[in-house]
Image: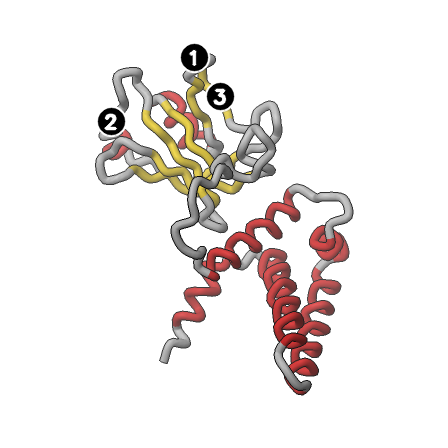
Amino acid sequence: MMNETLIGKVKYNEAGLVPAVAQDARTGEVLMQAYMNEESLRLTLKTGYATYYSRSRQKLWKKGESSGHLQQVVSVALDCDYDCVLLKVKQTGPACHTGQRSCFFNEVALVEEVPNSALLYELYGLIADRKENPVEGSYTNYLFEKGIDKILKKVGEENAEVIIAAKNEGTEELRYEAADLIYHLLVLLNEKGLLLDELFEELAKRRK
């Protein structure tokens, strides 16, 4: 549903454009930044797929129209000053024309370590991308191709291996098997359509 009041508050620059940031709705990863005019914003809201305005070509362009790397829009929000648009999207394939998943791959500095939860989001996002865009020889794609029964079998096997590793001396084997279990659990969550945010919300209820 469009909020005409908010749409009318968008502050376009002198060229009639407003910056728009696309964020992966599943992982929170920032994918790209482009520009919109009022027409492209309204088309995005109407069609449910991201449409931007190309400053170089001076025309509208639907993201992925030629490459197939479409952005299905989950939500649209404005910042507090109404001069930037945030799109949360389901990205098909890479968002960047270079073939990278995100346009923001030129790392200038690492100020501090990335939170471990971000690693889970990154892995979940990669698993989701493999499901939508299969890669030949990918083990993740092999699991999806075999279906839910195979995935459940692997989760059960890895769970048993964690138990065995925990009974042995030391933690190196346990660390390896626990990582395998978590990976296969993420594949299962993706197969069933359960988002990490939903899992974290449930985990938060355990804080007693």
Q: Are marks 1 and 3 in contact (CB under 8 Å)?
A: no
Distance Cα–Cα, label 1 vs label 3: 10 Å
Residue 7 position by quadrant: top left
Q: Secondary structure at mark 3?
A: strand
Quarter of the rendering occupied by the N terminus: top left
* Residue at the spot of label 2: 11
130 is higher (above) or lower (below) than 155: above
What residue sits 57% from the left and 25% below the top?
65
* Three-letter residue code for mark 1: Gln
Distance Cα–Cα, label 1 vs label 2: 19 Å
Which of marks 2 and 1 precedes in the sequence? 2
17 is higher (above) or lower (below) than 20: above
* Three-letter residue code for mark 3: Trp
Rendering coords of residue 104 (x, y %): 47, 37
* Residue at the spot of label 3: 61
* Three-letter residue code for mark 2: Lys
Residue 152 position by quadrant: bottom right
Q: Are marks 3 and 2 in contact (CB under 8 Å)?
A: no
* Residue at the spot of label 1: 58
Q: Are marks 1 and 2 in contact (CB under 8 Å)?
A: no
Rendering coords of residue 127 (x, y %): 62, 52
**Front disc: 1 or 3:** 1
Q: Secondary structure at mark 2?
A: loop
Residue 66 image label? none
Instruction: Please give left or right for residue 121 compared with residue 7 in the image.
Output: right
122 vs 65, nearest the viewer: 122
Rendering coords of residue 113 (x, y %): 44, 56
Rendering coords of residue 143 (x, y %): 73, 57
Q: Secondary structure at mark 1?
A: loop
